[in-house]
Image (tube, grey):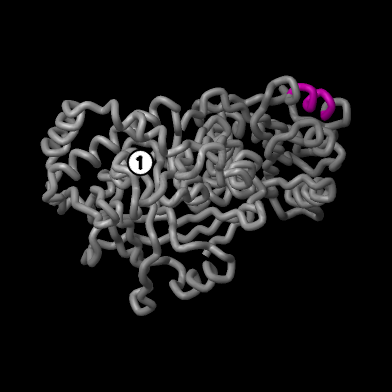
Amino acid sequence: MDMSDTRIGFVCLAADGSADVERARKISESSQKYIQKQEPFEVVAPETPVSDGNEASAAAELFRGSGIDALVIQFGTFAPDALSLEIVISVNVPVAMWALPEPTLDGVTPRCGSMAALMMHSSTLKHCNRRCGTIIGDPESSGTRKALDSFLKAIAVRRTLRACTIGLVERHSQGSYSAGSGALAVKDVFGASVSPIDSSRIAERFEHISPEQVEQYIAELSAAGWADEVEDADLLEQSIQSFLAIRALQQELALDAISMPGPCEGMHAAESGACLAQARLTAQGVMANGDCDIDGLLTMLVQHLFTGRPVFSAEWVEMDERSNQVLFWNACGAPEPLVNPRLHPSLRRISSGQGCVAIELPLKSGEVTIARLIAPGGRYRLLTAHGRAVDGDYPLHGACVNVKLDCDVHDLFETILENGFPHRYALVYQDITGELQALADVLDIEMIAV
């Protein structure tokens, strides 16, 4: 994830004359240093804590002129809500409010009042239709740093998404595209652009892939230990030729992610590599899925930007309430970095129409985050769950894995049905539930964590 030039505005509010102004200043400085160390973030901040309206106006001017990507407001002491209001309304960026613990509770009244300040300022901004995230705790505590890190990563992902282009390959008559409203919602909420691509463009590049290129790629797969179980040399060569054409188009258009039609009856020979493309491009850092599932692809892209890891796009096939597990599966396979180390990936035929080649890949065990974005009525919501992929039997061809959930499997299933989530999900091998919550807060997306 490219986080270069991500600028974080930081301001500490501390009421003039408070006994804790000096403490606020020291905590503010240490907090800024911590953020600055999370390279390559750049901190933009006033030299001292803000205590009055004039200083708040100066801070607002500083942030307006610096092109900040987000704003952190730390309450060094209790302070008037007019101070944060002056600053926040001047910049259209995500805001996190940070409350500090009381230094001591052995006096007559609270000394600091930071928590009360956060609640008051948050209420004021909410009435002005500005939503803010919250960070609570001492800057040195691991829990506080984890919350801050999640916010910073979410800001970096948001910035990166705004420079992303998602390709949507469709079969249709020229001049007619189905991505319209979905593309607008993606642009409005995430900032990413959706580029409709006629499948005929793949066919054009398909004709320019030479037999030598195909032979070289097959040799590379064989040298890497891939088993050939296709038993049809012509189909294998055709699917590889198609994959190379899809990859060439992705590189030509500089796509960060691509969604293609799934294998079906009557598909063009140039599309027979779509299954290979889903797995191989994703393994190379370009998220790819099938069935023109833009919201599913967007989920994969978000997970990849947070982790730098390949993501498994899979269907929910079956659940076992006794073991609290879900079986996830994709007929087209999965990125090879996810293979079970005891086994090896292989190539096989999918019998759909004239057929195409997919990857047989049993998945490894490990911690996973399950996620899915949908946008009913153009309003995005995000479902997340956490669990562990378990080693065991692989009952289906393609790529499959059983996930033992932390939540109750029946509760997750009912939540899916109640909220209109579909059957396909994105799985990444890392716990990023906190980061996804932070991104949902930053983008004002409804988060459903089970």
Q: Residues within 10 Å of mark 1 (few under 14, many from 20)?
A: many
Instruction: Give the residue furthest to the top.
Output: 65
Q: Is residue 353 above or below residue 132?
A: below
In the image shown, does 285 or 291 lie closer to the viewer?
A: 291
Residue 324 image point, x, y percent: 38, 73
Asked whether 58 falls inside the magenta stretch, the response is yes
**Residue 264 seen in render:** yes
Give yes or no for residue 55 being in the magenta stretch: no
Tell whether 34 sits left or right of 260: right
Residue depicted at x 60% and y 54%: 375
Instruction: Tell me the residue at 56%/46% (across/down).
Output: 178
Between 196 and 259, the residue placed more toward the observer is 196
Q: Identify whether 108 is placed above or below 153.
A: below
> Who's the residue at 50% across and 55% down the image?
372
Residue shown at 28%/33% (left/top)?
A: 244
- Secondary structure at badge 1 equals helix
Q: Main secondary structure of the magenta part?
A: helix
Residue 217 versus residue 323 in the image, above or below: above
Q: Which residue is mark 1?
A: 282
Q: Residue type at mark 1: give it.
A: Thr
- In this rendering, would 213 be left or right of 13? left
Which stretch appears magenta?
Answer: 56-62
| 123 in relation to 205, above or below | below
Residue 155 percent coordinates (x, y): 58, 37
Of residues 171 and 314, which is closer to you in this image?
A: 171
